[in-house]
Image (cartoon, rainbow, N blue to C red):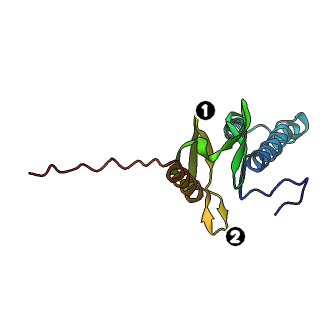
Amino acid sequence: MARPGEHPSPLFSFTAYSAFAGLSVGVALLLIWSVWVFSPSALSLRPPDALLTVSVLLFDLVLLGLGSVGLLLRVWNMRFFEEAFTVRARGVSASFAYTQLKDVHLYIVSSGLQRRQVLRIQVLDEEPFTITGNPRNKVLNTDLHSWLRNKMEGDESARGTSEAPPKATQPTS
């Protein structure tokens, strides 16, 4: 329970900052190393090797490309509370009620040797929000996808709507 004047702790949260920060540090260190490899003092000690030059430059370009992917992320931060969730994304900084959820999908994406879960959250009148991972809450013993699905089903039953088609009646003869 939050004290008066304090914000409640989120039940689930997602942030893209940590992944982007780690990648940025790696790119920066590699660029510093590349500048040192091609500095005039280092080149005066040994002649440039064409294979080393090409491989370092290609590796730099790949890392810069991966670093720029972080800039393309739409969702920067999502926090899920009991009654609503907040989103900080490109062009959006808002809070949404769970009644505004339109759909939630969990995808498994394989890239090389790595398998990741991607959660796509669609809200009414908004572009879908996509986050990497499916955070777990150990206290609630559930993951975000299951919890959002339960919230959506609970809201549908509270409104008296159901996706099941009406039962057909058989004419009596």
Q: Tell me where residue 97 sits by quadrant.
A: top right
81 horizontally vs 104: left or right? right
Residue 71 location (% of width, % of height): 72, 35
- Is disc 1 placed on a helix, strand or loop? loop
User: How far apart, in angstroms, are the residues tagged by discs 2 and 1?
Assistant: 31 Å
Residue 51 horizontal side relative to residue 155, left or right: right
Q: How many marks?
A: 2
Q: Secondary structure at mark 2?
A: loop
Q: Nearer the viewer, residue 75 or 73?
A: 75
- The residue where tag 2 is placed is 139
Q: Residues within 10 Å of mark 1 (few under 14, many from 20)?
A: few
Give how far across and how far down residue 134 sits, in percent.
61, 56
For label 1, the residue is 126
Amino acid type of disc 2? Val
Residue at the location (59% across, 44% down)?
99
Amino acid at pointer 1:
Glu
